[in-house]
Amino acid sequence: MPDLLEFLIEYGYVLIFGAAFAEQIGLPLPAVPLLVGTGALSRSGQFSFSGIVLVALIGSVLADWVWYRLGWRYGRSVLRFVCRISLEPDDCVRRTEDLFERRGLWALLPAKFVPGLNAAAVPLLGMVKTPPLGFIVFDVVGLVLWISLYTSLGYVFSRQIEELVMYVSRLGASLFALGVIALAVYVILKFEQRRRFLKTLSIPRITPEQLKARMDAKSDILIFDTRNQLDRRIDPLRIPGAFHVLPEYLQFEPGAFSPDREIAVYCT
């Protein structure tokens, strides 16, 4: 039996645990290929289907619990950190907040299947002080669905996948080099996507101190608070005189304001 397949069978559960933990903690190490591969091998008795789900579930829950507690303790600073290290565009936090505003804890189930949403969902639930029991229940259900889906795909298409594993295992070091290159390309593409997104946000900015100085000087400045309802419940304070409006409704008719009038928009 090829060395790679022997290694996978011998250390498979350890690899599953590590990959599931790494993916949920935010590292660019996708666990899905491993779940599919071991799911295929479970049909021939090399792995236990329930064992795969249980080990991946333990690793994932541990990682999610870390983010949940960090979100509970440090609040929005954790979300900002997630946005900085995430390879997903920075609007992941806003999209996650909007989803949870509409669906509540039920939003955690589909969020597991969307990398950008999954990165911000767990610390967000900690930030809004979701009861631990409710978080654990919905987190476990979402993770079981996520893990079972990909493991089941491997189980159903086991013959085709085992043939593929046998073939690629013969590549040895070449396969490892190919995997490193593929991961590097993935990271580069994600950073480029992030760079283009940030470029679209290249607009003039004003610091809180500058805004305060203009307000004190009675400057004719119009202020819009574009935070969603979830953010406003967490932090009900807003800049005096600011109008609350969601970004999708922030539209101006031509000539509605004087060209000399300044408009300031702030969010979370």
Image: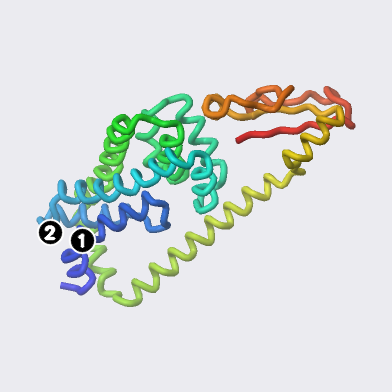
Q: Residue at x 31, y 57 (%)?
A: 19
Q: In this view, does 249 lie above or below 18?
A: above
Q: Nearer the viewer, residue 202 or 193?
A: 202
Name the kind of residue labelled 1 in the image: Gly
> Picture coordinates of residue 239 (x, y %)?
69, 27
Residues marked 2 and 1 touching at CB (< 8 Å): yes
Residue 84 appears left or right of 26: right
**Disc 2 residue crowd, few under 14, some 14–19, many 20+, Cα 10 Å:** some
As drawn, 166 above or below 139: below
Check residue 248 in the rendering and tell me which mark sits there, or answer none.
none
Dividing the picture into quadrants, the one containing residue 17 is bottom left
Residue on which the image places disc 1: 12
Asked whether the viewer can see residue 153, the reply is no
Q: Is residue 22 above or below residue 132?
A: below
Asked if residue 243 can be seen in this view, the reply is yes
| First of labels 2, 1 by sequence position | 1
Q: Could you say which is closer to the camera, residue 266 or residue 39?
A: 266
User: Residue at position x 35%, y 72% from top?
Assistant: 176
In this picture, is 36 found above or below 10?
above
> In the orientation shown, which residue stands out farthest toward the left?
45
